[in-house]
Each structure stands twice: as structure tokens, then as C-alpha cells.
Amino acid sequence: MVQQRTNPLRKYIRNRKLPHFFCPGCGCGQILNYFLKAVDDLQLDFKKIITIGGVGCTARIPIYLNTDSLHGVHGRTLAWATGIKLYRPDLKVVIFAGDGDLVSIGGNHFLHASRRNLDVTVILVNNFNFAMTGGQVAPTTPFNSVTMTTPYGSKENTIDVCKLAVSAGATYVSRWSTAKPIQTVKSIKKALQHKGFSLVEILSQCPTNFGRYALRTGDPEKVLEWIKNRSISKTKAEKLNEHELKDKFILGEFIDKKRPVFQGTTLFKEEDN
Amino acid sequence: MEALDGNSAIAEAIKQIEPDVVVSYPQSPSILILEAIALFIANGEMDSEFLNVESDYSAMSTCIGVASSGGRVFTATASQGLALMHEALFIASSLRLPIVIGVTNRTLAAPINFNADHSDSMAQRDSGWIQIFSENSQEAYDNIIQAFKIAENKDVRTPVMVGIDSVVTSNLCENIHIQKNEEILEFENKSNPTYSVLDIENPKTVGSLCASDYFFEHKMNQNNGIENSRKVIKNVGKEFGDRFNRYYGYFETYELEDAEYAVILMSSSAGTAKKAVDEMRKRGEKVGLLKLRVFRPFPYKELRESLSNLKSIAVLDRVLTPGTYGGPLFIETMAALYNLDKRPLVYPYIYGLGGRDITLKHIENIFDDMKMAFDNGKGIPEIKYINLRE
């Protein structure tokens, strides 16, 4: 007889909140797993972690975690995190934000948290659209994509969140995708251990909305494949010109450095890091 | 006749009106209005510019930009979206910009909820906007068409928000009458804007700093706009009725002429209340209903005329304003009636928060309670909450 085993990460899950709300094939479930794997590997004190979600599909991730969490207003996660960090610098604050949340309605907070090098970890789930409201164009939607508000393709340029974070002053920035689980977990671990503003952008599949409208497929595998085929590593990308990099997602670490972190009016000295 | 939900009815009206610009930011469930419009524009069924912006605040700010350069503009929002627009709403009304927005009235967080109540619109009741509430899809369509004509009237020049109840009206299909395009164009008859910042011949600045020397006068000018709208709303409602045979005023009365007891409320629950009144009338009870359509400007004079002969009335507010004696509709109704020599007793009720149901039975109970309280000597009415767990 096969002995039934529970997932070792199950202890971090708020069981009474299950079954979860994500669509079949959504990347959010995977990312929840990656985060728990990283926490488990690092043996972090789960009681010292606060998770924050704004509004959107990704923002629901903290609801299933057995941490203290805040959940509520679209785009304000980083403003809340700033408040928490100033009062309780001993807590580890992890933000789960969608692309709409972090760089559309909350774009301003994102710039200033990066600028201040606020000591938080942001896990950005980029599914290329506003998914919770039914698949509308977002600042991350690739050029010419069909969405519910761009019925014949979007004609606006996209934002490169990682470049933005680096230029605004973030100190750990990386981009991975749900098609690269090992690298993503590794990167989340680095981000969690990093002192300063760390951002892990994870390209993720949204079969229900982005898949069906922009890619004409509701099949999660095919959306994942689309992400994989468009992705290129940073080292390879360095050898290619701008034309060849058009429509490509560059994966890898973009910055990993030390800088004094924001602590209200007093700054940690660099030696303290 | 066409079967349309409230969102599609608004989108259909916008298609016929063809504003110069439609601004879009997703909020549930008002985004369905904008998605429908996006498709109309993409398919060439209407000729407007469609803009996807990055937040609700940007949406209202963009509307201000369009309207102050003389263009016609529309956007739709709900709940948190309207709350985020708060600051810009005051700018729009103070600059006398005839913007029209559709609001699917949804409650405000926390906790997050997607269902109907009037918390979002009521929180903006002092923003200087004209506020019109719709009972069903037909009224949503009709109100949007009238809204542009009211807002753009040269004596008014005040923005208008048209509310429909989230989910119950916005997402449920009903058979409604859609007028022909040419009928709507003839009715609208767009007038020229009073000013445009893009008037190169006469360069001007709007909204610049004004100290205590003239600020009060500016605000009174703004107030004149919304005061003037009283007459315009009435005339537009009548003209609409003359053309399309559906008449509109500040409110709709139902079996109120000889009634002794009445209920006052707004939006979708009026359907339930009408049915309850019918049932009670069958049993010989003298009850009636007043459904308020225009909350701003508040039609206090007209309400006095309609309500002063009643024995008592129950005012049903679909919003909780913590720490007040009754909701905004109750407070304003009381204020309208207080100075009369003979006035009915007014009971405050709160109902339907976050989409909580109100049924025929609840409304019948309200009438019964009111009657009993009146017969047993008055006392001071306390706030009652309908369909709330004890």
C-alpha cells in the first residue's frame, strides 16, 4: 500500500481558505509554491513575515499563506509596506503584486520605494493584462495584443519593469518566468536574503484572459510555451542587437548591489548590511 | 425592443451620442461598459477616441483635459474607482466642465465586495456633481442621454454622474427601448463649449490661484450652475418624454396621491417596493412609494409638496454613514420637511449593504411597523437595519 504523504509545504498554508480561487492553469499557484519553497529552504521564521497583496489575481496569494497579511486597495501595497517597515523594521515584508497593481495604478509608489531602497521583497507576477476585471490592456501588454479594451490590438508601448526598477534605485532586480521554476526559486531566495529593495518579476501565464484573447488559446501549456519561446537569457541577449531583441523577454539578474536602506530619517550605514 | 443589461444600455447610449473621447480604466463591473464601447469604436460603429489610462485618478484627470479643451468626454467607474477620483471630481465641477460619467454603484472596501450599495456615489455627494440614479436598464439608457443635455446646457455647465446598481442592474438583462440614432442626435443638439483652453485667439488660464478676495464669489458661481440645473433637469425630462414617451422628473411617485404611509428610496430596490405597494393596496392599505431619481441637486421643495400630507414615511438608505442619525437621504428629507407646520413622522432605515437582499416581505414589514408606531403614539424613531443578522 502506498502511504499517503502530505506536501511538506502544506504547513504554511491556511487550510480553511482552500480550495483556492485561481483559474485552472493559472501561474499564481506555482508562484505561491515557489515562494514557500524558498522560505522552507531558507528556514525563515514564518511568524516574522508579513505578506501584502493589493487588488487583483496575484493579490490573492497572501490569503492562502499562514502569515499576517494585508489585502485591500489597488496599487497601494508599497505605501503600506513603507509604513510597516518604519514601525517594525525587524519584520520581513513580502509584496505580491500583479503588473496592473505595481506599475499601473501603483506606479508612483514603485518608483519611490525603489528610490529609497526600502527593505522589502516584491514578487511581481506579470501576466500581461488586468486579469481580475476580465482581461483589459495593461502597461505590460505586448504591442499589438488583443485584449478586451483593445479589440484589434494594443497600440501602446510596454513598460520594462526591471529597467525601471534599476534606474529608480532598486538594489536587487531579476526577471524569471513560471517556465523556469528552479531559477525562479533561487532568485526568490536571493531576494528574501537581500537587504534593500528587491524585485523578482515572474512572467506568468493567464490562460483565461491573456491566453484566450491575445494568444487565441485557453491552454495553459501553450501560453507557457509562448512565454518560453519569447524568453532569452541575459547573457545571450548581450550579444544581440536591438532589432533581434524586439518582442523578447530578457531573463536573468539585472542588478545585485548594496546601498544604504531606508529607515525613516536615519539610514543604515553600509557596513551594517 | 432589445434585451440589454444596464452596462450595455449605457454603452448603447454612448454609441449614439459619440463623445469625442472615451477614457477607460478597469473597475468591476463598470469595465463592461467600456469594453463594449472599445468594440464599437474598433468596429467603426462609432467615431470616438478611446484611451486606456493607468488609474481611475488619471481617467478623471484626462476627462478634465478633454472637457477643458472643449471636447465631449465619457468614462465609467465604480466603487474604489470613484473614490480615487475624489480630488479630481471637485476640480471638474469647479471648472464647470460638462463631463458625464456612468457609475455602477458598488460598495466601498474594506472588506472588498463587488455588490450594490450607494456608498461610492454618496461619498461624493458634496463634490458639486449632478447625481442621477437609475432603477433599471431603460432608465440607465435614458438618463445617460439626458445627462449630456443637462451638463452641456449653458446655464448649467456642471458634470453629471449617472448611477446604476452594481450587478442587479448592471449585469442583468431586460427588454428596453432604444431610440433611433437620428432621434438621439436631434435631441442632443450639441452646443458649443463656453470656453476652451485650446482657443489660440484668446489664450487663457483656468483654475489658477485665487485668494480670499474672490474665492467665495467663484464658488457661488459654481453653485448657481447646479441651482440652474433644477429647471433644466425638469425641462429635459419633459422634452425627452414628449419625444420618446418616457417622462422623467426629480422623482417618480407610485400610488402616492391618497397614501397615508410611504417609502422613499433610490435605484433598483424601487422595483421590489412597487410590487410590495401593489400587494398591500390589494389588501386595502393606503401605502405609496417615492423613488428619488435626482439626488443632487436635492429637490427639497418638490419633496415638501409630495410628502407633507402623509402620516409617516420611511426613508431607506442603501449606505451606512457611520455616526449619523440615519443615512444621507433620510437627513436631507428631514431637513426638507422640518420647517413645515404639518409634517409626517420620518423613520430612518438602512438596507442592502454590499448587495444584501431586500424582499417584498421586508418592505411590507416596514409599512406595518410604521403604521403600528403611528397608531401607538409616536415616540422618537430610531434607526433600523433591514435584513441584518442579530
Image (tube, helix red, strand yellow):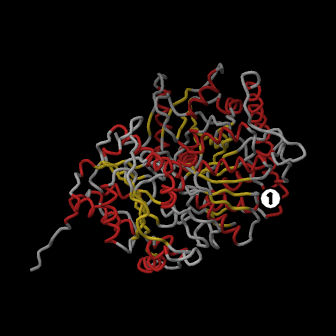
Report the front residue among B208 and B23: B208
Position of residue B114 relative to residue A223, above or below, is above
**Relative to A239, does residue A54 appear above or below in the rendering?**
above
Residue B235 appears left or right of B320: right
| Closer-to-camera residue (A54/B72) | A54
Point out residue A169 in the picture as x, y percentages from the top left corner.
Answer: 47, 52
Q: Tell me where residue B324 appears, x and y as whole percent.
A: 49, 28
Q: Quadrant of residue A139?
A: bottom right
Instruction: Give how far across and how far down residue B233 sits, in percent.
Output: 76, 42
Image quadrant where residue A138 sits: bottom right
Q: Which quarter of the rendering shows the N terminus of chain A?
A: bottom left
Q: How many marks?
A: 1
Host chain of mark 1: B
Q: Amino acid at mark 1?
A: Ile
Visible residue check, residue B358: no
- CA neighbours of label 1 inside 10 A, class few (<14), some (14 to 19), many (20+): some
Q: B99 or B4, which lies in front?
A: B99
Residue placed farthest to the right in the image?
B201
Q: Which residue is mark 1?
A: B184
Classify B179 as above or below B228.
Answer: below
From the viewer's perspective, is B291 left or right of A269? right
Which residue is located at x 84 percent, y 41 percent?
B154
Is residue A42 visible in the rendered image? The answer is yes
Label 1 element class: helix
